[in-house]
Image (tube, grey):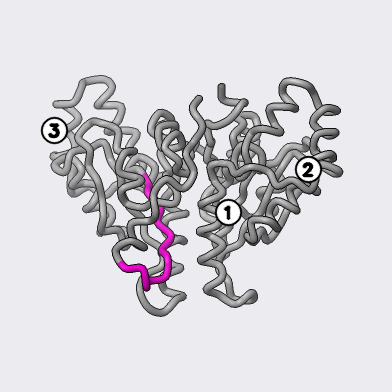
Amino acid sequence: MSKPRQGILPKVSNLMNPSKKPKLVIAISSTALFDMRKSHSIYEKDGVAAYAEYQRQHEDDVLEPGEAFPLATKLLRINDKLEGDPRVEIILLSRNSADTGLRVFNSIAHHGLDISRAAFSGGTSPYRYVSAFGCDLFLSTNPEDVRSALNNGVAAATLLPSKGGSTDNDDLRFAFDGDAVLFSDASERIFKERGLEAFTENEKAAAHTPLDAGPFKGFLQALHGLQSEFSADSCPIRTALVTARAAPSHERVVRTLRDWNVRIDESLFLGGLSKGDFLNSFGADVFFDDQQTHCSSAREYVATGHVPHGVSNE
């Protein structure tokens, strides 16, 4: 797999008005935002024409929330907590045409979501618009679209069907795996190829050498920037690192985050324990991990995004 390009484009919002505070921009596919399984089954069974006719006939029928809906709702609420221009924007990306996608926008209006920008790509992959919109993150149910976005330097994840839903609190809680998500997969590759002892020795020897960036570094930095708009006791966003690492390999992680000058509110070094219970205790609204085994554990408790990047996905 080709290595994602980091920071290939300055954010569009900054180019248009450099004096504005940076905006957190997240692209969400229509199939992640809403439950479109029924219409998709018609597409797979009967083809494009039958799908288009079904969507037109049902364009006034409101779509039910999908995996990303609770997260989107909480994200947009942050704008109510800050004065001035909105600091969070959600972009809708869809393989529908504008015609068949009318039902999606009708459902957005019904649910009261402040989403006004969209790209309807008419059956082709919409991932190519992620960079054009200046997005910090792309969430989809289509693994190939997610891979394409990652390969073009954008943080992206495939949202999996999960038993998790919206958490009861108003805080927005993001949880991240470390290697191959926030950080590069270089250390994980040593573990996969040479075992735990070689991995541990490498991390001890390189404790003062920052880890290279993974695909989600930029998104974490964007979250950090948004967090800095709030005081410590009023910030509605909380982050956690949930990693299979343990002492002594934790030191390099801590020093890397210090070198990046980014904030992680909670860090869990689990030493290989299953992550699901810990994510439930943290109250994560979404968790990002590169390994399917960890995703399977997490999705029993919280919304989970698989990041198809690194040695575990080759």
Q: Is residue 114 left or right of residue 228?
A: left
First in sequence: mark 2 vs mark 1 = 1
Q: Which residue is drawn at 75% across and 53% down?
A: 255
Mark 1 secondary-structure assignment: strand
Q: Name the residue type under label 1.
A: Phe
Position of the C terminus by quadrant: top right
Q: Give the mark toward the camera: 3 or 1.
A: 1
The part of the image, by quadrant, that contains residue 193 is top right
Q: How far apart are marks 2 and 1 (CA)?
A: 17 Å
Mark 2 secondary-structure assignment: loop
Q: Are marks 3 and 1 in contact (CB under 8 Å)?
A: no
The location of residue 109, given as percent across then percent down, is 25, 59
Look at mark 3 in the image and give the residue it sits on: 53
Q: Give the range drawn in magenta.
A: 17-28
The location of residue 46, given as percent across then percent down, is 21, 20
Q: Residue at x 13, y 42 (%)?
A: 99
First in sequence: mark 3 vs mark 1 = 3
Q: Name the residue type under label 3.
A: Glu
Look at mark 2 in the image and give the residue it sits on: 270
Relative to the observer, which residue lies in front, 133 or 60?
Answer: 133
Q: Which residue is drawn at 35% across and 46% down?
A: 131
First in sequence: mark 3 vs mark 2 = 3
Graded by Cα atoms within 10 Å as few (under 14), some (14 to 19) or many (20 or more), the crowding at tag 2 reads some
Q: How far apart are marks 3 and 2 (CA)?
A: 51 Å
Q: Distance between the residues labelled 3 and 1?
A: 39 Å
Q: Do the residues labelled 3 and 2 touch (CB within 8 Å)?
A: no
Q: Which mark is residue 174?
A: 1
